[in-house]
Amino acid sequence: MRHARAGKKLGRDSAHRKALYSNLAGALIEHGRIKTTVTKAKAVRPHVEHMITLGRRGDLHARRQATAFLRSRDVVHKLFADVAPLFKDRPGGYTRIIKIGTRPGDSAEMAYIELVDDEYVATQREERTPEPAAEEPVAEEPVVVPEIPVEAAEELPETEEELVEDPEAAAEVLATEEEAPADDAEADEPAAETEEPAAEAEGDEPAADAKP
């Protein structure tokens, strides 16, 4: 017989179960509402309400008792400074359980357990909601102007219109055209000289054959 052994075991030993209650109670005090199974919500509800009652007392001994159970000084500070004053005129019933259906996978009954102060729950949800990221302005890429080499800048104009506009350039073009035929003539003279000895050699061959 399980006499004087009230409560659910939740498939855990006593140390693991105590840590579970501590974590669930701390999360509920910090965030105002948590989502868990119906069985866990019903099991942790008395512990949460006891912590809020300690917060309403507000003395040093109550703070030490809350710290021993919650194991977090930050959560205890929030309990005594923010949560407990909301229920100073309420004699009990600080939480509510809202069933939300079954969980996919194992069909466990799920529920929200939350504080009955709707304003506190709403403010905590707004603090947890991340703000939309602001769009950063896109930096424009600088326009790269290609550098013109000096040799290309000093090239002579090619069109007749440019020659007319620039008389100095026209004079340089005419000078280069006059030098080109002279070079061609000098290149042809050695070729003519090489042809004459060849012709003389051909004329001497019959004379050599005529000798006895």
Image (cartoon, rainbow, N blue to C red):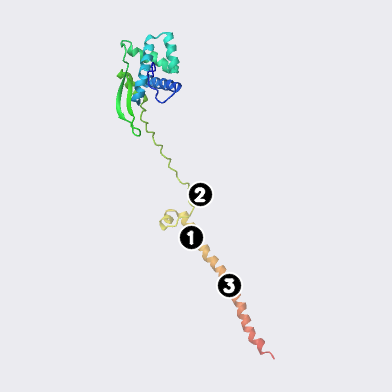
Q: Among all residues in the image, which is located at the extreme front?
A: 1
Q: Residue at x 51, y 51 (%)?
A: 151
Q: Residue at x 67, y 86 (%)?
A: 208
Quadrant position of residue 206: bottom right
Badge 1 vs badge 3, beta-carbon distance below 8 Å: no
Lower position in the chain sequence, tag 1 or tag 3: 1
Q: Please state which amino acid type lies under the numbered disc 2.
A: Val
Q: Please state which amino acid type lies under the numbered disc 3.
A: Ala
| Residue 62 sits above or below residue 176 on the image | above
Q: Residue at x 42, y 58 (%)?
A: 160
Residue 174's mark? 1
Quadrant position of residue 182: bottom right
Badge 3 local density, few (<14 within 10 Å), some, or many (20+)? few
Q: Regarding mark 2 in the picture, which secondary structure is present there?
A: helix
Residue 195's mark? none
Q: Nearer the viewer, residue 176 or 64?
A: 64
Q: Does the rendering let one see residue 32?
A: no
- The percent coordinates of residue 49 (x first, y second) are 35, 15
| Residue 43 sits above or below residue 62 on the image | below
Which residue carries the number 2 mark? 150
Which of labels 1 and 2 is toward the front?
2
Q: Nearer the viewer, residue 42 or 91?
A: 42
Q: Regarding mark 1 in the picture, which secondary structure is present there?
A: helix
Lower position in the chain sequence, tag 1 or tag 2: 2
Which residue carries the number 3 mark? 191
Q: Among all residues in the image, which is located at the extreme bottom?
A: 212
Q: Nearer the viewer, residue 191 or 20?
A: 20
Q: Please state which amino acid type lies under the numbered disc 1.
A: Leu
Give how far apart the Cα atoms at labels 3 and 2 are.
Answer: 40 Å
Q: Nearer the viewer, residue 154 or 66?
A: 66
Q: Regarding mark 3 in the picture, which secondary structure is present there?
A: helix
Badge 1 local density, few (<14 within 10 Å), some, or many (20+)? few
